[in-house]
Image: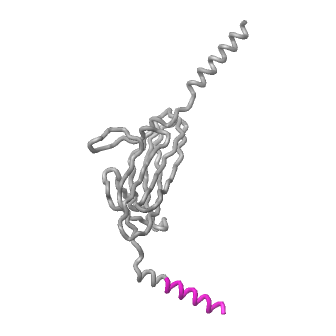
Amino acid sequence: MRRVRQKLLLTWLALCFCGFTSTAHADPLFFHGTVFALDSAGNRLDLFSNPGVLLEPSTYGDTIFPPALLFVTFVDVPDGLFVSDNLRFTFNEEGSAPFIVSNPIVTDGTAIDLGFVARFVPRQAGRPLLTTLTVDLLNSSPDFVLPSGPNAGQAVDSFTYTFSTLTPTPEPSSIILLASGALAAFTGRRRRLS
């Protein structure tokens, strides 16, 4: 009888211990501060405060080629929260299929403010294209609190930023110059080989 009580007591303690150490799912995670990186000097543009803005790709100090758009957002993880989630960026330009970048989030219960970067290369249309960027924490709902405007403070599930992108198309003279340089290099190499 005593052994049965000991087993029951150990089983009860094990269940209690497991119940207190279980990991939480991502709620209440929220993302905030989604910005467009203007250049490599750290200048940025808040997308929420600038709806409909015209964005142009950059090489970011000649470190990124081809020119691209960089977006940054942050996720605050409170202390004591064990998280497994995915932050998804969906970039959708007018007339193109959506492009998705997903970033896994796994934490060990330590409070942290995580930054995530998504890089997108817009297509060269030579005219402004209506573009959207949707940011979503897949396992959290709601996951964004509207920071301002008539619905300030309202919690929503994901958020879609709307803006335009403009990638200039090369001028015909630039294309001719590039082609003639390539032809000259090819001809010079061919002569050296002969």
Does 153 appear above or below 73?
A: above
Colouring style: one colour
Quarter holding the C terminus? bottom right
Q: Total marks drawn?
A: 0
Of residue 171 and residue 75, the one placed in the foreground of this image is 171
Residue 185 is inside the magenta segment: yes
Of residue 58 and residue 43, the one placed in the foreground of this image is 58
What residue sits 47% from the left and 43% below the top? 137
What residue sits 43% from the left and 81% below the top? 174
Rendered location of residue 169, percent (x, y): 41, 73
Does 129 appear above or below 178?
A: above
Which residue is at the far top? 1
Residue 37 is inside the magenta segment: no
Rendered location of residue 117, percent (x, y): 47, 53
Rendered location of residue 125, percent (x, y): 40, 69
Which residue is at the far front? 95
Give the quarter of the image for residue 61: bottom left
Does 125 appear above or below 156?
A: below
The magenta region covers 179-194
Q: Is residue 153 left or right of residue 19?
A: left
Q: Is residue 130 left or right of residue 121?
A: left
Most common SS among magenta residues: helix
Rendered location of residue 188, percent (x, y): 58, 90
Which residue is at the far left? 150
Q: Is residue 127 left or right of residue 97?
A: left
What residue sits 55% from the left and 37% below the top? 108
What residue sits 33% from the left and 62% below the top? 54
Quarter holding the N terminus? top right
